Image (tube, rainbow, N blue to C red):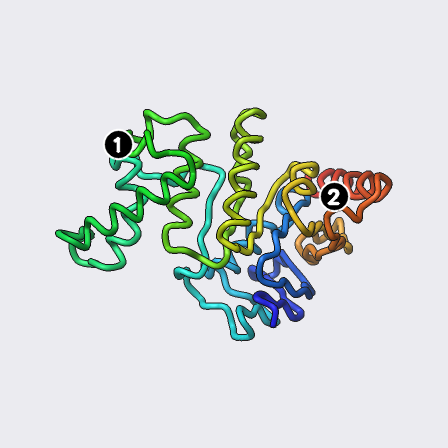
Amino acid sequence: MAIIEMNNLWKEYGDQVVLERLNAEVQEGEFVTLVGASGCGKTTFLKMLLGTESPTRGKLLLDGAPIPDQPDETRGIVFQRYSVLPHLSALENVMLSDELHRHKLIGRAFGGKRKALKDAAMAMLESVGLTQAAGKFPHELSGGMQQRLAIAQALMKRPRILLLDEPFGALDPGIRRDMHHLVLDLWREQGLTIFMVTHDLAEGFYLGTRLWVFDKTRLDPQAPGAYGARITYDLPVGDCDKGTLTAIQEQADATARTMA
């Protein structure tokens, strides 16, 4: 059974159609990258996977059942803008979700439970290469280190699905390459299913096992919100020739001009 299924999935806000007629299945362990013009619904789709947005029509299924309508431990997310809390150390940031989950009133564990949680958080920091930064605060970390910390936060609950919303867009090229290696290592080691939004087509082909292109196939200049984006290409990475790559880029550029 597929981990994620979409059956005639739509997302609308009033008379504004964002996504329409999405149909696809994703098997556990796939790495799906999402590309397309700004504003075509890629982040909205991630929010539906997370559970902070609900489908308007159609079905979005997790293991054959409707996806939970609120975030839970099955899905973690990392945004482009660092989501760490500035008043907590790196270690405390990673511990926070479990402390809040286990101790909702005071948000803090004690005794043996706290030690076990601290050990688990240190192991997670080690997995993202931040062992030496455990006691540092976010303002003492570089952009790449802060994003490593955000990934550690997202993985602390051992989610099955990791959602990445342009996580490397604000990083320098050299740091981005390091982050690429980190994400690929974590994906393989933890058996994650990953959905990642990126505006970098080359990044999408390099990281993913499968690439989705979101684009509007129907456009009405008099009513720009009348139609939504669809998945116009669904490509196994490595099976795309240079001509198809160029066509995808030209299609995305044309849509961006139309939507501007």
Asked if residue 124 can be seen in this view, the reply is: yes
Side of 134 where 126 appears, left or right: right
Q: Quadrant of the C terminus?
A: top right
Q: How many C-alpha atoms fall within 10 Å of the one at disc 2: few (<14), some, or many (≥20)? A: some
Viewer-side label of 1, 2:
1
Q: Which mark is residue 135?
A: 1
Q: Which mark is residue 246?
A: none
Q: Is residue 96 above or below residue 17?
A: above
Q: Nearer the viewer, residue 187 or 51?
A: 187
Which three-letter amino acid code belongs to the residue tagged 1?
A: Gly
The number of discs equals: 2
User: Residue at 59% of width from left, 71% of height from top?
Assistant: 59
Asked if residue 214 can be seen in this view, the reply is: no
User: Residue at 44% of width from left, 61% of height from top?
Assistant: 74
Q: Position of residue 211 (x, y in %)?
A: 69, 50
User: Residue at 78% of width from left, 40% of height from top?
Assistant: 254
Question: Which structural element holds mark 1?
Answer: loop
Q: Position of residue 4 (x, y in %)?
A: 58, 65
> Where is mark 2, residue-wise?
255
